Image: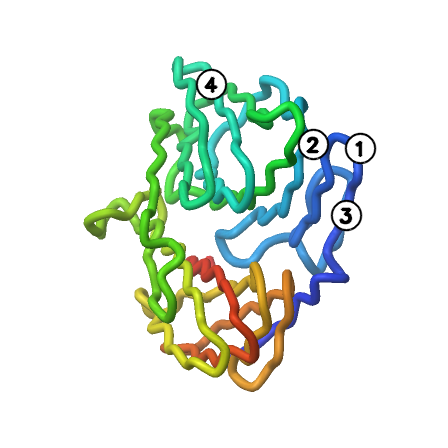
Amino acid sequence: MKIELHPAGERGHANHGWLDSYHSFSFATYFNPAREQFGCLRVLNDDTVAGGTGFDLHPHNNMEIISIILEGALEHRDSMGNVQVLHPGEVQVMTAGTGIYHAEYNHSDTKQVKFLQIWIFPREKGLKPRYDQTMFPDHSVKNNILTLVTPDTAQEEGAMWIHQDAYISNINLQKEANADYTVKIPGNGVFVFIIEGEASIQGNTLKKRDAIGITDTGSIHFTAVADSRILLIEVPMK
């Protein structure tokens, strides 16, 4: 087993006033040659957008983009004609493929919205753009691993899918509870991100917004030091 710690305080940070963003990997003006990506995981941004503001229409291509809403409401518009509002418990998936324009705005004029944006390289380029979103009503259930995203080749009922051999899961652990995550595809690595709380992962104690990259293992053990919400991103490493 190989382990690499990603302390929250070592992330890139940009505060534009309307947007307060932390970058787990090199992004925009933040560049760290040791933090380019984790396998096929290219971006994990922790974004807070002020009320009445947002990202204007902009393009993407050849990327699987996943947004997880943590707080507030996020309004989405894109060049395929989709207009949606997402709330906590909802997950958004976009295949940028051959090219898509989209805008993301805070749906409220007064309250902030917090969300995680994840970019994963697809298995192939030139895919047809697509958009989907799903509410996970059991996203807050305790001591249960909830699969949010699966590969297109192994779709699970209730989960979303992307064009890559990757899985995204959420687990809410009560204090002192234990859990084990089994790697779905041999050779994949798992990037573990502590959304809230504090947990011991393979003997390493991580606090809010800390992360750990784990490779060369078939399973990962968790013990909650405090009530915790944990995100697991399993991806091919090459």
Q: Residues within 10 Å of mark 2 (few under 14, many from 20)?
A: many
Element type where label 1 sits in the image: loop
| Amino acid marked by disc 2 | Ala
Kindly check if marks 4 and 3 are in contact, taking CB atoms under 8 A apart as contact. Answer: no
Q: Residues within 10 Å of mark 4 (few under 14, many from 20)?
A: some
The CA span between labels 2 and 4 is 21 Å
Which residue is painted at 27% across and 45% down in the image? 152
Which residue is painted at 50% across and 78% down in the image? 175
The CA span between labels 4 and 3 is 27 Å
Give the residue pinned by disc 3: 13
Q: Among all residues in the image, which is located at the extreme bottom?
A: 203
Which residue is painted at 79% across and 39% down in the image? 15
The CA span between labels 1 and 4 is 24 Å
Residue 93 occupies which quadrant of the picture? Answer: top left
Which comes sooner in the sequence, label 2 or label 4?
2
Q: Nearer the viewer, residue 1 or 208?
A: 208
